[in-house]
Image (spheres, grey):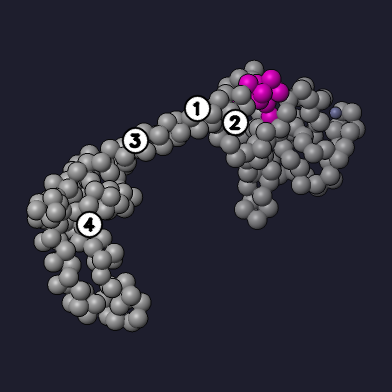
Amino acid sequence: MAPLATPPHRTGLLVIQPLKKRHCVECGTGPLALLVLEEGAPRCLDCADLGHLVFLPRGDTALTRRSREGSALSTVVVRFNRRRSRYERQGVLVEEAALARAEERCLADAEARRRRRARDARRREAEDLRFTDAFAREIRRLFPGCPAERARAIAAHASVRGSGRVGRSAAGRALSEAAVTAAVRAAVRHTDTPYDQLLMSGVPRYEARRRIAASVEARLWEWRDELTARA
Ligand SMILES: [Zn+2]
């Protein structure tokens, strides 16, 4: 029988996933999926009094930690990596009841996280609406001649990028006269001029902008004039 490499000394119980077919020296069961080495001799989990434990593969840190905390008896499970010449952790053996409790707590956490995300989403939605309202009001203040529905559409479009989710100060910056004017100018450019068609037909951007500049500014002047609003 080929000797097992000796696992590194560690405190606590260690269970091994053997690379070779091993049988229990005490009851003869085998080949063993998991074994315990006692003075170099392999024993099955039952003979080592660990038969009541269940295997929890590595990967879920919270579940592992909680399962071990809840288990009066638990062990680490290792397997020898030949290429790296070292034992590597595969998971733990824990009490089934502790694992069940840990799973419940992790599920509760996941549910709590899901509810929190839903709350956050609702809050962001409300913030977005408030931001859109504020943006639309600011457009109408600077451009009284801009139809209300146009102001609303421009504000909604700007909110997709600028909204409350970027924070209060950034939202404040987004509502500056320069930012609001830029948003209105961009909307006019794309909606009230042939700018997009020019770009699509291959006109360079600067040339397209040059061609439409006058009509964009004319529309902005028109909207700045309160008389237009009353007309
Ligand atoms: Zn045995």
Residue 221 position within the rendered picture, expressed as x and y whole percent measured from the top left:
11, 61
Q: Nearer the viewer, mark 4 or mark 2?
A: 4
**Disc 4 on helix, strand or loop?**
helix
Instruction: Identify the residue under disc 1.
Output: 112
Give the residue drawn at x 22%, y 41%.
134
**Disc 2 on helix, strand or loop?**
helix
Instruction: Please name the predominant secondary structure of the magenta segment in the image.
Output: helix
Q: Which badge, 3 or 4, is on the more N-terminal residue?
A: 3
Residue 98 position within the rendered picture, expressed as x and y whole percent measured from the top left:
65, 21
Instruction: Identify the residue under disc 3.
Output: 126
**Badge number at residue 64:** 2
Q: Which badge, 1 or 2, is on the more N-terminal residue?
A: 2
Dot 2: within a 10 Å radius of its alpha carbon, few (fewer than 14), some, or many (20 or more) residues?
Answer: many
* Name of the residue lying farthest toward the top: 72
**Distance between the alpha carbons at the discs numbered 4 and 2:** 52 Å
**Distance between the alpha carbons at the discs numbered 1 and 2:** 19 Å
Instruction: Identify the residue under disc 4.
Output: 183
Q: Is residue 217 above or below residue 59?
A: below
Residue 60 position within the rendered picture, expressed as x and y whole percent measured from the top left:
58, 36
Q: Which residues are magenta?
A: 93-102
Residue type at the position of mark 2:
Thr
Residue type at the position of mark 1:
Ala
**Disc 1 on helix, strand or loop?**
helix
Tell me whether circle 2 and circle 3 mark residues in contact (CB < 8 Å): no
Q: Quadrant of the C terminus?
A: bottom left
Q: Which badge, 3 or 1, is on the more N-terminal residue?
A: 1
Q: Quadrant of the N terminus?
A: top right
Dot 1: within a 10 Å radius of its alpha carbon, few (fewer than 14), some, or many (20 or more) residues?
Answer: few
